[in-house]
Image: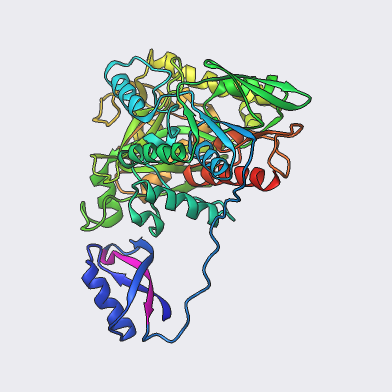
């Protein structure tokens, strides 16, 4: 059986029959099987938008042999007596727990938030009443913050191909569409994610793992630089291995870890706001038409480097919603979310500036000061809005520094509060963002007519744990931090990969 890879140029609404005919024509063969290896939209020329599809073809009519099989993730199983505790059920925590359980550890996964069904109900109630639920919100709960997001599966991290393949195949087995394994910019959508995290939980439990929801990690008992117990609101839990994957919103967890001698350092991160436009406007600008057969919704990625701070768009959610993503009852932040079909009326994206805590404080900042500063900023937005309304203005208002005079339509569920948004953000951030927004308005027609709202403060963590080569927290024998909360990853794929690598190192060493 021979093998060949080819790239085909196909209409945006092509059928499988058209794809098969294109293969026949390109290779002059009749009998074959094929798999889509890669698929990306080429929209560089508005009059000729098409899919670029890489296809792997197998046929006896092809002479060249198939390529060597890429190595898969091999989890080293053996009978073990050791117990492992993992805190946090986001991608890093969940996949760390799954790998440890499959490698023979008796693994318990604890999550401060609720299971996904309870969490979804809590979020719905929050958006109707404005009453915050600490156990069921956009930040905490089963699957982590990513469960209620667009579910993007892109990553710039290198050397994670086996881990990424394991994550994607796990998602497909749990109900994700097959296309996530070949789309250039795959996403799951929050509607799919709610089902997927539930099915993944069942897989973990079927392998013998234990999961405990609404179980908050209050403290760690440490003896001779070794953790011996986790103190939770549901009692103490003993284990031999402890992996913490708290995400980057759990401020009290970070303060506890600092108090217990875990070493962190400050690092670059990003803050800003979220911009929103009618999706039809973005489609028209990117495609030259409001609808394109076979494509859900147009995306954009924008970067501006001609100011004191780099400004860029991040986590763009086509056909999505701006949501109240506060982790605490006295904080006000926003994030983006979309369903798999990306068929809602508005498009939104974070517009953020890269910063460092030292710049923000005007001096060398300690880790604790970086956390305090960010928390105070989130509380400042809450105090301004007197709750969870999103402070907003138009993008043109922001550029011109003029307070808004009109209330726009928006996807944000808890209402908007007119605001001099540029004054709520640090001056260096807002000045750079103003220049960037002016530039973005020349690159996307009508961009300045959109809204800019809220505080986007969760693109990355301002701190990073100091880890040894084996992944342990510096100075500790059996304590590990993984995922976004560690400061070494960001997003579903890189966080999940960090959790997998952490667990694999543990399994290989014991």
Decide if residue 410 is on the left or right side of residue 375. left
Residue situated in front as seen by the camera: 234 or 190: 234
In the picture as drawn, the residue positioned furthest to the right comes out as 224
> Where's the C terminus, which quadrant?
top right
Q: Residue at x 53, y 26 (%)?
A: 426
The structure's colour scheme is rainbow
**Residue 487 position in % (x across, y down):** 60, 37
Q: Residue at x 54, y 40 (%)?
A: 101
Residue situated in front as seen by the camera: 299 or 446: 299
Main SS of residues in magenta: strand
**Residue 47 position in % (x across, y down):** 26, 65
Instruction: Please identify the quarter of the rendering in which residue 277 is found.
Output: top left
**Residue 341 position in % (x across, y down):** 26, 46
Instruction: Please identify the quarter of the rendering in which residue 120 is found.
Output: top left
Residue 352 lies in the magenta-colored region: no
Residue situated in front as seen by the camera: 36 or 48: 36
């Amino acid at each position: 059986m021979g093998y060949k890879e080819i790239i085909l140029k196909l209409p945006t609404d092509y059928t499988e029959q058209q794809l098969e005919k294109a293969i026949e024509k390109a290779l002059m063969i009749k009998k074959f099987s094929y798999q889509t290896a890669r698929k990306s939209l080429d929209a560089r020329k508005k009059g000729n938008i098409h899919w670029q599809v890489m296809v792997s073809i197998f046929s006896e009519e092809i002479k060249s042999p198939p390529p060597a099989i890429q190595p898969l993730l091999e989890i080293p199983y053996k009978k073990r007596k050791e117990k492992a505790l993992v805190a946090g059920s986001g991608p890093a925590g969940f996949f760390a727990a799954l790998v440890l359980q499959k490698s023979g550890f008796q693994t318990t996964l604890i999550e401060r938030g609720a299971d996904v069904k309870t969490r979804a109900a809590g979020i719905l109630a929050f958006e109707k009443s404005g009453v915050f639920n600490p156990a069921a919100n956009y930040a905490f709960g089963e699957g982590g913050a990513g469960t209620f997001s667009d579910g993007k599966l892109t990553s710039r991290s290198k050397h994670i191909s086996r881990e990424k393949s394991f994550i994607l195949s796990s998602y497909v087995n749990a109900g994700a569409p097959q296309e996530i394994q070949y789309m250039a910019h795959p996403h799951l959508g929050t509607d799919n994610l709610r089902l997927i995290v539930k099915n993944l939980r069942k897989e973990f439990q079927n392998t013998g793992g234990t999961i405990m929801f609404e179980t908050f990690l209050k403290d760690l008992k440490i003896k001779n630089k070794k953790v011996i117990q986790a103190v939770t609101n549901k009692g103490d839990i003993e284990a031999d291995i402890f992996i913490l994957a708290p995400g980057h919103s759990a401020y009290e967890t970070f303060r506890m870890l600092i108090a217990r001698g875990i070493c962190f350092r400050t690092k670059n991160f990003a803050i800003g706001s979220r911009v929103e436009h009618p999706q039809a406007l973005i489609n028209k600008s990117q495609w030259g038409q409001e609808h394109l057969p076979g494509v859900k919704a147009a995306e954009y990625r924008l970067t501006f480097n001609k100011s004191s701070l780099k400004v860029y768009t991040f986590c763009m959610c086509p056909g999505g919603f701006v949501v109240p993503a506060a982790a605490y009852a006295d904080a006000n932040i926003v994030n983006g979310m979309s369903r798999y079909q990306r068929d809602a009326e508005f498009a939104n994206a974070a517009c953020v500036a890269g910063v460092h805590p030292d710049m923000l404080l005007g001096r060398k900042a300690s880790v604790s000061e970086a956390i305090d500063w960010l928390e105070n900023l989130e509380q400042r937005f809450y105090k301004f809005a007197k709750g969870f309304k999103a402070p907003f203005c138009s993008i043109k208002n922001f550029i011109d520094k003029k307070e808004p005079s009109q209330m726009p339509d928006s996807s944000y569920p808890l209402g908007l509060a007119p605001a001099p948004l540029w004054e709520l953000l640090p001056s260096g951030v807002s000045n750079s963002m103003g220049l960037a927004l002016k530039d973005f308005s020349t690159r996307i027609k009508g961009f300045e007519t959109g809204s800019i709202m809220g505080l986007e403060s969760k693109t990355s963590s301002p701190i990073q744990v100091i880890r040894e080569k084996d992944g342990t927290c510096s100075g500790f024998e059996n304590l590990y931090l993984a995922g976004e909360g560690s400061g070494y990853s960001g997003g579903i794929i890189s966080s999940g990969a960090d959790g997998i690598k952490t667990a694999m190192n543990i399994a290989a060493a014991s």
